[in-house]
Image (cartoon, rainbow, N blue to C red):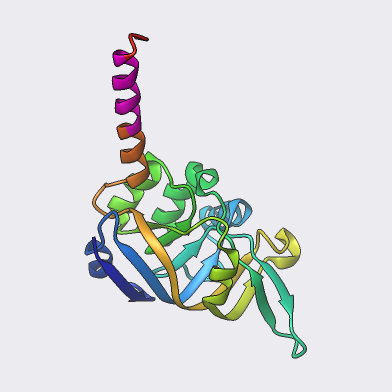
Amino acid sequence: MGEFRLTTPIIEDAVSRLKVGDTLFISGTIITARDEAHLKALELHNEGKLLPVNFEGIGVFHCGPVMKKNDAGEWTVVAAGPTTSARMEIFEDEFIKAFHPRIIIGKGGMGTRTTKACQEEACVYGAFTGGAALLAANRITKVKDVFWLEELGMPECLWVCEVKDFGPLVVAIDSHGNNLFLQINEHVKANVTKVYKQLNII
């Protein structure tokens, strides 16, 4: 397991070097997107319409940040904790195939559909520590833009952020078909079965 520091736009070769268990820090651009933003982006894509942002090569952060404006009228980040990524599992694969981000950031892991899409499209999933909203906020150096704020609201809209050494992220899904969370689940199931047999429960 290694430590990597990547800057967006991230190229495919850089992603291919990452393995499950590696530690990753991102600099450059990340865009927040939760359920409603994913659905709206895919709807526009399927209608052949252009999006206000380009996700290719950057990081997509499952996050509903708390923002405020400073005295100069600029948006600043108060807190930016990760959202449970499993909520996006039903459409993350379609999103990755449509928009080609290089890293999905969230908490709690994702399933087989996202794992397959990451393998096919050279993308990884980076797990960020839940509850570390201030850590994430401190790594966001600038809010560059915001889209769909009036329509979707602050937590659900697209916040385009500039970050410096955003992380640490644990590579939980790599581009080679490995999924740390699924591996752990299988290991736990095997141990539970073993214990049950020892206790003559099964």
Which of 49/66 is in front? Answer: 66
Give residue 168's position: percent from left, percent from top: 41, 66
Task: Indicate whether 184 appears above or below 140.
Answer: above
Give residue 178's position: percent from left, percent from top: 27, 47
Question: In what quadrant of the picture does the C terminus appear?
Answer: top left
Q: Residue at x 35, y 32 (%)?
A: 188
In-image side of 80 versus 74 (left or right) = left
Let me know if residue 111 is in the magenta part.
Answer: no
Q: Main secondary structure of the magenta part?
A: helix
Give residue 91's position: percent from left, percent from top: 49, 46
- Residue 100 seen in render: no
Q: Residue at x 22, y 68 (%)?
A: 13
Which of 171/157 is in front? Answer: 171
Instruction: Single out the residue that lies furthest toward the bottom.
Output: 72
- Asked where in the image residue 152 lies, by quadrant, the reply is bottom right
- Residue 200 seen in render: yes
In-image side of 190 versus 114 (left or right) = left
In-image side of 34 versus 171 (left or right) = right
Give residue 201's position: percent from left, percent from top: 37, 10
Q: Which residues are magenta?
A: 188-198
Q: Residue at x 38, y 71 (%)?
A: 25
Task: Indicate whether 70 appears above or below 138.
Answer: below
Let me know if residue 191 is in the magenta part.
Answer: yes
Task: Indicate whether 156 appears above or below 78.
Answer: above
